[in-house]
Image (cartoon, rainbow, N blue to C red):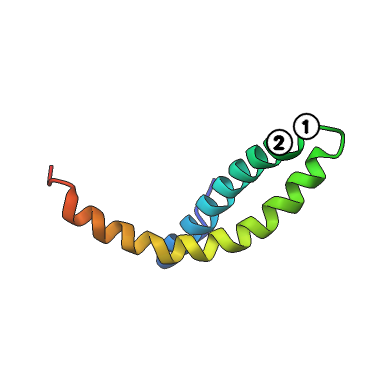
Amino acid sequence: MTPFIAKRHESIVFGLLLSGMMSCIVSGLSTAIATGIGSDFALRWLAAWLPSWAVAFPAVLIVAPIVRRILRHIVQEG
């Protein structure tokens, strides 16, 4: 695959993909635990995932720099 996203957008796209994947996994698990896996599971999962992603994406963009700052203080150099 040929790269098509400018380097300056890497952190935003990283946050978009990370938040999308994580919210998909967590909402799927939560939906299965709360309501079981029935014939309408996929629709219930999608209904839970999309709002979750809408919250997770900006949260990742806000939290990631804070986590990086913390890591600079607690991780030893090579």
How many residues crowd mark 1 within 10 Å: few (<14), some (14–19), many (20+)? some
Estimate the spatial distance between the alpha carbons at disc 1 and disc 2, rounded to whole Å. Answer: 5 Å
Identify the amino acid type marked 1. Ile
Residue 30, image x, y percentages: 65, 41
Q: Which residue is mark 1?
A: 37
Residue 56, image x, y percentages: 55, 58
- Please tell me which residue is depicted at 68% across the width and 51% down the height of the picture: 49
Q: Is residue 38 left or right of residue 19?
A: right
Q: Are marks 1 and 2 in contact (CB under 8 Å)?
A: yes
Identify the amino acid type marked 2. Ala
How many residues crowd mark 2 within 10 Å: few (<14), some (14–19), many (20+)? some
Looking at this view, is 54 or 78 the one in front?
54
Position of the N terminus by quadrant: top right
Looking at this view, is 78 or 22 the one in front?
22
Residue 66, image x, y percentages: 32, 63
Residue 52 is labelled as none
Q: Is residue 65 left or right of residue 37?
A: left
- Please tell me which residue is depicted at 71% across the width and 51% down the height of the picture: 48
Residue 2, image x, y percentages: 52, 50
Q: Which residue is mark 2?
A: 32
